Image (tube, helix red, strand yellow):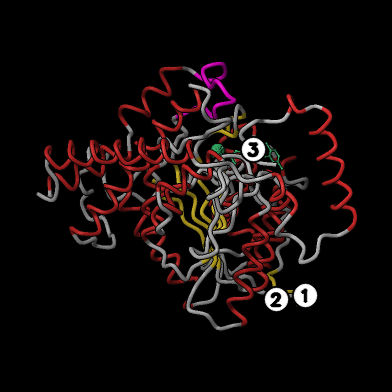
Amino acid sequence: MGFLNILFSNSRLIHRIARKQTLGQFPVTLLGVSSTSILKEQSSLFSENDDDDYSQVMDIPGGEVPITAQMKFISESSEKRLPCYRVLDDDGYPILGSIFEEVSKELAVKMYSSMVTLQTLDTIFYEAQRQGRLSFYLTTAGEEAINIASAAALTLDDFVLPQYREVGVILWRGYPVQQIANQLFGNKLDYGKGRQMPCHHGSNELNYLTVSSPIATQIPQAAGVAYSFKMDKKEACAVAYLGDGSTSEGDFHAGLNLAAVLDAPVVFICRNNGWAISTPINQQFRSDGIASRGQAYGIRSIRVDGNDALATYSAIRAARKMAIKEQRPILVEAMTYRVAHHSTSDDSTKYRPVEEIEHWKKSKSPISRFRNYIQRNGWWSDENESQLRGDTRKQVLQAIQIAEKTDKASLTDLFTDVYDKMPSNLQDQEKLLRDAVKRSPKEYPSDVPI
Ligand SMILES: Cc1ncc(C[n+]2csc(CCOP(=O)(O)OP(=O)(O)O)c2C)c(N)n1
Ligand SMILES: [Mg+2]
């Protein structure tokens, strides 16, 4: 099997084998003609010195392509897997010879502190959901570096179209912890006025599109946003975040193709965390992950270690620069692992080994890795660590208390903000709802103003 792969994928090898007249040793039915006729045909079509010097071309829409007399199928995959760009090893030591974007002490400490804030708020909000105070929650556990390092590489002018496991990105852009709590509790201070599920953050001011529950819708939208930036000659790009599972949606293919054809300045950041709820990646695609598909769409792509904050920061900085300067889409596949359950509606120990989860939690933590790096640089200490963790915990607990006490958005808000003047069908629906509340007041939540 291995040999067949090589034979199909490597034209040079076939030619070399053919020249040594050894092809006859191999199953000739593979190519459908006899070995001698292949050798004869080849000598007229290829020069002896340069295997790739095709002497005939075919002029077709889209340009000239070389002609070959060999019936060769393109291999379904390359023998070699795409490499993963990394700067820090698992212990946070820079890998010898690694090329990366230098970060100042100030930026590194801000990045680290934000990762810890993200981890702290995830832990506390997750617990609050388990206590029945929130209806739903999902964490970014294990993916803190992708969240924070990618956000740090962007500017506020860039327009972010998130999936849902990227609360760290909006946090980095200036969305307050209090606002996160307001959204989760769906109170009247929530920008969405309680009309979205928890974890569906968004902010006009921060150029961050509100999360959509149907996955992958943001991908073609990002191509559109980027195209509008191109027309306006803006010094900014669109940035779409997506999971490995989203690549199975038609929107992924439509979005990438559209972006490529339009030469739209968009960075697609795919968090390949191994799982789409309970579906592992080997049931999601046969390709070498996601980065390999970029080339088929004509999109420059890279695979990066998403648990390495420095590598992620450097790759996204470079991707952003190329997207804007060269007006082109870029695809980044960030390799990671979803350490937590998919959400509070899931128990991942039912479909994956606990040892696997523990391994990623303990030995592959992006937070410990980056902490080792900054602490070794003399930029961080154990005292800084306990102070930060204590302060952050207090801040999040206080935000929960305030959000919980704040009134919920009112029922009237359910019908506003889409139309300037409420259309008659919505007026009918509001009346129906109010009649239902009157008929069965006990079924209506007592804390939501009518
Ligand atoms: C169109 C659509 N189909 C299915 C779902 C249900 N669903 C929600 S999340 C999810 C898995 C997504 O996995 P992935 O993109 O890898 O993101 P991750 O949760 O791993 O971060 C699915 C199937 C959905 N929300 N929308
Ligand atoms: Mg996933």
Give the spatial CA distance, label 1 vs label 3: 65 Å
Q: What secondary structure is marked by label 1?
A: strand
Q: Is residue 428 left or right of residue 325?
A: right
> Of tags 3 and 2, which is closer to the observer?
3
User: In the picture shown, does residue 249 fall above or below 354?
Assistant: below
* Residue pointed to by mark 2: 64
Question: Residue at position x 65%, y 64% from top?
Answer: 43
* Residue pointed to by mark 1: 60
Membership of 348 in magenta stretch: yes
Q: Is residue 397 left or right of residue 67?
A: left
Q: Amino acid at mark 1?
A: Ile
Residue contact at pointers 2 and 1, CB within 8 angstroms:
yes
Residue contact at pointers 3 and 2, CB within 8 angstroms:
no
User: In the picture shown, does residue 91 fall above or below 205?
Assistant: above
Q: Which mark is residue 47?
A: none
Disc 2 Cβ-to-ligand 1 distance below 8 Å:
no
User: In the picture shown, does residue 260 fall above or below 118?
Assistant: below
Q: Amino acid at mark 2?
A: Glu
Mark 2: few, some, or many residues within 10 Å (few <14, many ≥20)?
Answer: few
Counting residues from the start of the chain, the first of labels 1 and 3 encountered is 1
Question: Residue at position x 24%, y 60% from top?
Answer: 103
Q: Residue 423 lies in what quarter of the image?
A: bottom right
Give the spatial CA distance, label 2 vs label 1: 6 Å
6 or 386, which is in the foreground?
386
* Residue pointed to by mark 3: 448
Give the spatial CA distance, label 3 vs label 2: 66 Å
* The C terminus lies in quadrant: top right
Q: Residue 248 lies in what quarter of the image?
A: top right
Q: Amino acid at mark 3?
A: Val
> Of tags 1 and 3, which is closer to the observer?
3
* The N terminus lies in quadrant: top right
